[in-house]
Amino acid sequence: MYAIIKQGGKQYKVSKDDELIVDRIVGNPGDKFDITDVVMVRDDHVLVENLDKVKITASIVEHLKGNKVIVFKYKPKKNYRRKFGHRSYLTKIRIDDIKIPKGKSVKKEKESEKSEEVADKVKTTQAAETA
């Protein structure tokens, strides 16, 4: 089972016990929090329909800083040079659990059914082109 979540303006594909590094989250290491912004959940060829009720529990592992990014401004012939840099504040989180509510799910169509539908569409378009 995996889910696609939004965190800090980015999307991540996560499953249970995954660890990932995201933008800084307020809290102390060991704190648990819920991720409510879920884009998609998939469980053994079944897509979940009610994403509002999906609950993903995560915990903060540690806070850290990213690699230093150097910014250098330069204007030729004007003796203007500025060098500075920054390090982004990041948080390492662990996905503890993905809870899916019991209820409706959208089952994946069999590949053979899809291929038959595509073949029918191709036949109809070819017949329309020749007519």
Image (cartoon, rainbow, N blue to C red):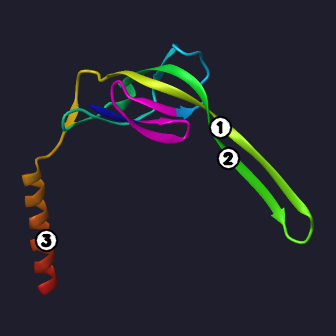
Along the polypeptide, which appears first: circle 3 or circle 1? 1
Residue 131 appears in the rendering = no
Instruction: Choose mark 3 or mark 1, whichever is in front.
Output: 1
Q: Residue at x 19, y 38 (%)?
A: 45
Residue 122 numbered mark, or none: 3
Helix, strand or loop at label 2? It is: strand
- Label 2 Cα crowd, 10 Å radius (few <14 / some 14-19 / many 20+): few
Q: Give above or below for 84 relative to 48.
A: below
- Label 3 Cα crowd, 10 Å radius (few <14 / some 14-19 / many 20+): few
Q: In the image, which residues are magenta?
A: 5-21
Helix, strand or loop at label 3? It is: helix
Q: Are marks 2 and 1 in contact (CB under 8 Å)?
A: yes
Along the polypeptide, which appears first: circle 2 or circle 3? 2
Along the polypeptide, which appears first: circle 2 or circle 1? 2
* Residue 104 within the segment the image draws in magenta: no
Q: Position of residue 35 (x, y in %)?
A: 46, 26
Find disc 1 in the rendering and name its residue. Answer: 88
* Residue 19 within the segment the image draws in magenta: yes
Find disc 2 in the rendering and name its residue. Answer: 69
Q: Give above or below for 49 relative to 32.
A: below
How far is disc 3 from disc 1 in space, using C-alphas? 52 Å
Instruction: Choose mark 2 or mark 1, whichever is in front.
Output: 2
Q: Residue at x 39, y 28 (%)?
A: 52
Residue 82 falls in which quadrant of the image? bottom right
Helix, strand or loop at label 1? It is: strand
